[in-house]
Image (spheres, rainbow, N blue to C red):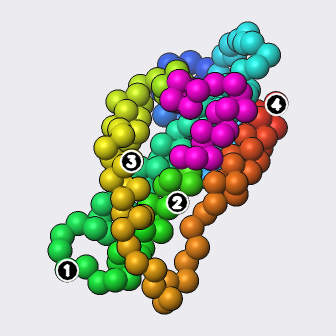
Amino acid sequence: MNDSLHKHYALLSKKERLTLYLRAVGRADQRERDAVIAATPKRTMQMGDFYPELDALQTMILLHFVMQLDNLVGVLLLVHGEDKPTAQWHAARLMAQNFLATEEAWQAFAAEYGLAYDKLLTGLAGPLLPVFTMCRSEPLVEMVARWDEGLADDSTARLVPTSAAAKLADYRQTLTALIEQAT
């Protein structure tokens, strides 16, 4: 865009400026993005001093949901149907082990804040609560655990599941990075 148009951005509606900004992002047009931001009225907000940490936790909960749903869908796809090759069952077992290690790590992570695992997730899940409830249903988790237990070891399976301790360290590092980014 040329400079003569930039000076009129302040006359646009909030929705029009947002659309213009998003289109500039899509084109990687930093100059227009800066012009839209410069023409946009500013708001002053107040928030609690722990807001960056709360925002980081909510982001991590979303990531936890996505990872766990990905693990569950992967397991379900691998075991759906009959006459699966042994390698496919071993892949399902690995995904089930990762699911369970991630659940264990998330429980420990929540405990570091003195919160019960389910209460932390349901308290911060917001509109994702129905998805969370489905993902955390005990029959589903038990079914994943049974897939892990019932399979014979195969010396050809070389993949190692993620440990709960490694996952917990990853959660701590992610939270720290998100907080640092927000402050």
Residue at disc 1, secondary structure: loop
For label 4, the residue is 183
Give, as a three-letter code, the residue at label 4: Thr
- The residue segment tinted magenta is 103-121
Mark 4 to mark 2: distance in Å? 32 Å
Mark positioned earlier in the residue sequence (4 or 1): 1
Mark positioned earlier in the residue sequence (3 or 1): 1
For label 1, the residue is 83
Q: Tell me the crowding category of disc 2: few under 14, some 14 to 19, or many 20 or more residues within 10 angstroms, Cα based.
A: many
Q: Tell me the crowding category of disc 4: few under 14, some 14 to 19, or many 20 or more residues within 10 angstroms, Cα based.
A: few
Quarter of the image for residue 86 reads: bottom left
Is residue 117 found inside the magenta-colored segment of the image?
yes
For label 3, the residue is 141
Left or right, 90 with reference to 20: left
* Residue occupying the point 36% across, 49% down: 142
Residue farthest to the left, as pictured: 82
* Residue occupying the point 33% across, 47% down: 140
Residue at disc 4, secondary structure: loop
Mark positioned earlier in the residue sequence (4 or 2): 2
Position of residue 104 measured from the top left corner of the image (x, y, whole percent): 58, 47
Position of residue 3 measured from the top left corner of the image (x, y, whole percent): 68, 37
Position of residue 23 measured from the top left corner of the image (x, y, whole percent): 51, 43
> Can you say which quadrant of the picture contains the N terminus?
top right
Name the front one of labels 2 and 3.
Answer: 3
Position of residue 147 measured from the top left corner of the image (x, y, whole percent): 36, 63
